[in-house]
Amino acid sequence: MTQRHVDGSAGDANYGVIGVNYTNYRQPEPYFAQRIGDALGAARSVLNVGAGAGSYEPVDREVTAIEPSASMRAQRPAHLVAAVDGVAERLPFADQSFDASMTTFSVHQWQDLAAGLAEMRRVTRGPVLILTCDPAALDRFWLNDYAPEAIATEARRYPTMASIVEGLGGQAEVQDIPVPLGCIDGFSEAYYGRPERLLEPGARLANSAWSFVDPAVGPRFVEHLGRDLADGTWDRKYGHLRSQPFFDGSLRLIVGRP
């Protein structure tokens, strides 16, 4: 049975807590939006599952949004449609209702991945888009040197690429999505060249992994990274990232075809 938190959040993360001020740090990155738009192709009607505050919802198509967290629904801007309260595993729509469907940074929150993917496939005539992270590539990021617990937590939570492809019926393409240096969607790798940002509590809170690690990890991370930034240790090892245009990290776009 799908777990529901006090604010309605489904899955393992309580967005009634971590969703506070979420949009201050998690804005839609234009490069990612472009890649999603390209993959949506000519679709006119689009379902956004686990829609959150509306990141990456196309404004030039007919969008239906579904989101279980009341706090996230409340942060949706006025120019977007109101989100329906619901979960991926039980979509309240008829078969083949939409030209395309999408979900971004959501599948690792689902209680039943196979059921959610099957539901998206059921209600969709065309492509099904999944923006997520590859757990096998998370350790490419320097954060693994400073908070390996956070990386290990994410690696346990994110489903494998193979499991998503299988859940979409085996007809899917996995695309690598490099992260631009000035990325405004503040998932952890967005700060690959701006390490100071991850010293901010709000930046860490906007990444659900930090809510699952031991409370002592955050202060230890801040002390360690802060010291290495102050004495130049971080820059000696990773300073080249400050001017590297893109980072080939763990971000993937899986496009399932009917």
Image (spheres, grey):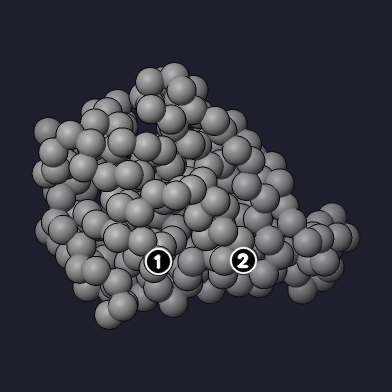
Considering only vertical position in the picture, is 229 above or below 171? below
Question: Do residues under tags 1 and 2 come within 8 Å of each other at their CB atoms?
Answer: no
Label of residue 183 in the image: 2
Kind of element beneath mark 2: loop
Residue 239 visible to an observer of this rendering: yes
- Residue highlighted by disc 1: 60
**Residue depicted at 43% across the width and 42% down the height:** 129
Callout 1 environment at 10 Å: few (<14), some (14 to 19), or many (20+)? Answer: few
Front one among 49 and 135: 49
Identify residue type, mark 1. Asp
Residue 14 rendering spot, x and y as whole percentages? 26, 56
Front one among 130 and 150: 130
Considering only vertical position in the picture, is 187 above or below 153? below
Whether residue 224 sits left or right of residue 106 in the image: it is right
Please name which of the two marks, 1 or 2, marks the residue nearer to the observer: 1
Residue 125 rendering spot, x and y as whole percentages? 31, 36
Kind of element beneath mark 1: loop
